[in-house]
Amino acid sequence: MQRYSGFGLAKHALSHHENWQRQWRNPTPKKRYDVIVIGGGGHGLATAYYLAKNHGITNVAVLEKGWLGGGNTARNTTIVRSNYLWDESARLYDHSLDLWKGLSQDLNYNVMFSQRGVMNLGHTLQDMRDIQRRVHANRLNGVDSEVILADQIKEIVPIIDTSKNARYPILGASWQKTAGVARHDAVAWGFARAADALGVDILQNTEVTGFKIRDGQVYGVHTNRGDIESKTIGCVTAGNSGVVAKMAGLKLPLESHPLQALVSEPLKPVLDTVVMSNHVHGYISQTDKGDLVIGAGIDGYLGYGQRGSYATVEHTLQAIVEMFPIFSRVRMNRQWGGIVDTCADACPILSKTQVKGLFFNCGWGTGGFKATPGSGHVFAASLAKGEMHPIAAPFSIDRFNTGALVDEHGAAGVAH
Amino acid sequence: MFYIHCPYCDEYRDEEEFHPKGQAHIARPEDPETCSDEEWGDYLFFRDNPRGIHHELWVHAIGCRKFFNITRNSASYEILETYRMGERPRFSAEHPQGESAEHGAAVNVADEAGRVADQEGVRA
């Protein structure tokens, strides 16, 4: 792999940038791999990368039915934070945040991770009590977090409406300074390039159509490019996890919903942090290019259509204008939807299954992007050892039968 | 944006008047006390989540406030039919073109409606 550097950029300028190496190969599938990862989104590619880098398992294939990072990795609002309430999820997301901090150097790829801070607003007294509780829990878990009040919010975000006359007055917020945003496509590409350099085969346009299972042990997959064998298979297929699970005869505690986001026309810099609100239900940040990136809730019905409903767009923008009256005349440029696989407790599934050798990493719902490196890291460790990593263990699929749920819904500043 | 026919109002109304309530035809275990953890967890959390034809429960929340079912394609979003509680769908994954109307009417399953009506505090 050609390493990227300032010197390299200057060198390639001399040849009019025509001699850059391809970022990853386009190999033909081998007959057999040590590990197969199904799904070439951020989480799948991160899993493959850490398998190769941390566990020396380089005979790995990533099977992607479309193109790399074409699903939710390319369709999210790029927010990275770790201020979750419960110990289990705080550990998981904070582990991820730690990896984010050195990720660009680690991958030799600029993922544009920008720790510009994330605030979760409170609009009622109960909101503020919940925020206090969560911030205390965060601090006990070593997660950077503090409570700020309306005048401090106004100082950080001068354009926000903190007047008492607002219909949903802003009373305060939780503030995680070390949180921020990253460039979503670069995350997929960076992991893909780094994994490929370590020998991982990234197979695009390769759709899994079935599993080979004998005596409760998986030993391969059927694909549109022929059968591929492996005794360890990790499914990282987000919204399509239910469909893939069905091929293995499994049922998951998931429902797939469309979640949409939209961007505005580019504006001059006006918002240099991320503002989220559970109560009026919307979140917003501004990209380096100047677009406002806006998101909110899922459509309530099941759907695989990768598009959202107009009613949801309207509700989302109502919330944004409630917080930022200054944006009332900003025009929206594009709108899109991704398919998120939601669990009843708003926590992911990182788990073994009844089929030996078949693992699932799914259920990230509306907030998976932030966890990309952490998820890949602990899932790779689990695939390598055949036992779930301690950070991943509480997110077993068994919790839906034992009742040991990690109930993050509404408790985590999860704006959904 | 859906334009949904409420089988009770017998009118097409805007999606905004309705709320989706998840997968339809999930029967509550007859005797929850004797359920194993597996059975109870499956009942509460595990869903079919199909990509394709799906039966779902909706409520006409700011209309007649009655619950009813929709058969809808979760990939194309096409609504194939709406039908009342206790009625049987004509369209299903096994019958994507729909069974004949007579067949559906003939097997008018009272079971589901009966179970709802038998619950404590429910007046038909």
Image (cartoon, coloured by chain):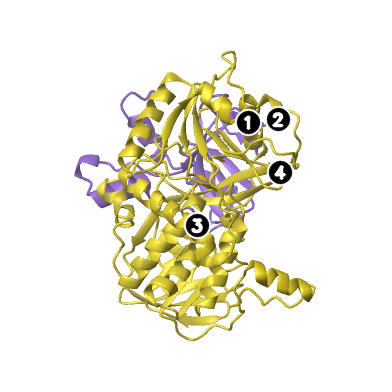
In the picture, the disc for residue A238 is: 3
Kindly identify the amino acid type of the residue bearing the numbered disc 2. Answer: Phe
User: Which comes before the other along the chain, label 1 or label 4?
Assistant: 4
User: Could you say which is closer to the camera, residue A347 or residue B9?
Assistant: A347
Q: Residue at x 35, y 30 (%)?
A: A133
> Which residue of the protein is positioned furthest toward the right in this rendering?
A16
Q: CA distance from mark 2 to mark 3?
A: 33 Å
x and y percentages locating residue A263 in the rendered image: 69, 43
Q: Is residue A293 above or below residue A341?
A: above
Q: CA distance from mark 4 to mark 3?
A: 29 Å
Q: Nearer the viewer, mark 4 or mark 2?
A: 4
Q: Which image quarter holds the N terminus of chain A?
A: bottom right
Q: Quadrant of residue A350?
A: bottom left
Q: Which residue is mark 2?
A: A327
Residues at discs 4 and 3 both on one chain: yes
Chain A colour in the picture: yellow
User: Could you say which is closer to the camera, residue A410 or residue A229?
Assistant: A410
> Which residue of the protein is positioned furthest toward the left in this rendering?
B34
Chain B colour in the picture: purple
In the picture, the disc for residue A290 is: 4
Asked if the residues shown at circle 2 and circle 1 are in contact, with their CB atoms under 8 angstroms apart, the answer is yes
Residues at discs 2 and 1 both on one chain: yes
Kindly identify the amino acid type of the residue bearing the numbered disc 1. Answer: Ile
Residue A351 lies left or right of residue B1; in this view the side is: left
Kindly identify the amino acid type of the residue bearing the numbered disc 4. Answer: Gly
Q: Chain of mark 1?
A: A
User: Could you say which is closer to the camera, residue B54 or residue A274?
Assistant: A274
User: Which comes before the other along the chain, label 4 or label 2?
Assistant: 4
